Image (tube, rainbow, N blue to C red):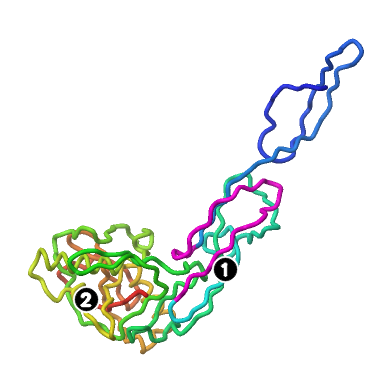
Amino acid sequence: MWTTPGNSVGTAGIRSHSMTFTPNDTTNYNTLTQNVNITVMQTCTVTFVTRAPAVTAPSSITVTTGQTYGTLPTLTPPTIPGGAIAVFNGWTTSETGEGGTVITSETIVTTTSNQTLYARWIFTAGSYTIGGTGGGAGIIYYIADGQEGRPLGFTVEGYTGTMGSFPSYTAYYLEAAPNNSGTAQWGDYGITIPGVTTFTTWPPENDPLGNKIGNGRRDTLTIAAYLAANTTETNRAAQIAVQAQGGRSDWFLPSAGELNLLYQRWDTDGRPAAYNLTTQWFWSSSQFNADCAWGQHFYNGSRDFSGYYKYTTSSVRPVRAF
């Protein structure tokens, strides 16, 4: 029997080491030194991100470097309004679900570190399409379809207060009202309204809050409730935006991120007349500070707070998420 000191051989992989074998019986046997290859096995934890808030992430698994991933979890697609169909299409190393390395059960594990895999989705549109009519007789301008880095659905934050209540829910579409709801002040100049998305990063796209979607409805109701409880102001942007139209009562003033998506879609599509948009300043429900709120100019897409004092007048275009 040969024995050797318990020296480390390093990280996973095949390592060549010079080892000395010393026999117990040194009288009849010589000490032997030679190179040997040692295979070190490394285990890693793989976690899964569904990129779909309505789909629960499966439990993590343990894999071994140099071996196959083995059985990987599958996902059950969510039910999507309008008859759209999503199909789970496996896992990738790219957090956008596009590109990266596609991982299957037969893929050899090459990483020696813990790993996150992201769901890939195939999406087939139903009755709601970009530029088409939504459930409130407005225009669909964004679909969270799991493609090109978009998630498969997004979470609309819930609200409880004097303006009613609703739990958070998963939406797949943003719909713009068919027309502007006039112009208005944002309201409550000099006060930072608590509970409203507030950020001061410039440019806004460098802040996650500047691109966030799903927060506009909650923020709009929070603003309207605060104005009603603490001021005598009326006909402010949030108060106008929540008014029912098209048989729906879930309209709201879009967040900075939701408003930017409306501009991008309208501009990318050649500024079609069907949107009934003009090159005006539009309010968002996102707050900059006590004096200003975020808005966007639809002439060139400029997103700004300077000049967007809460007492100034800008256009209001309600949207809804479903």
Return the x and y of residue 197 as percentages of the image width and height.
Answer: 28, 61
Question: CB of mark 1 within 8 Å of CB of mark 2?
Answer: no
Return the x and y of residue 32 as percentages of the image width and height.
Answer: 86, 21
Task: Tell me the kind of residue under disc 1.
Answer: Phe
Range of residues picked out in magenta? 51-80
User: As drawn, is 305 to the left or to the right of 43?
Assistant: left
Which residue position is annotated with label 2? Answer: 314
Task: Tell me the kind of residue under disc 2.
Answer: Ser
In the rendered image, which quarter contains the C terminus? bottom left
The outermost residue toward the top is: 27
Q: Secondary structure at mark 1?
A: strand
The outermost residue toward the left is: 232
User: As drawn, is 129 to the left or to the right of 275?
Assistant: right
Q: CA distance from mark 1 to mark 2?
A: 43 Å
Q: Quadrant of residue 139?
A: bottom left
Identify which residue is drawn at 28% across, 85% down: 247
Q: Is residue 79 magenta?
A: yes
Which residue position is annotated with label 1? Answer: 88
In the rendered image, which quarter contains the N terminus? top right
Q: Earlier in the sequence, mark 1 or mark 2?
A: 1
Identify which residue is drawn at 53% across, 79% down: 124
Q: Is residue 41 above or below residue 155?
A: above
- Neighbor class of circle 2 (other Cα within 10 Å; few <14, some 14-19, many 20+) is many
Q: Nearer the viewer, residue 242 or 76?
A: 76
User: As drawn, is 189 to the left or to the right of 144?
Assistant: left
Return the x and y of residue 6 as percentages of the image width and height.
Answer: 70, 24
Q: Is residue 301 above or below residue 292?
A: below
The outermost residue toward the right is: 28
Return the x and y of residue 82 as percentages of the image width and height.
Answer: 44, 81
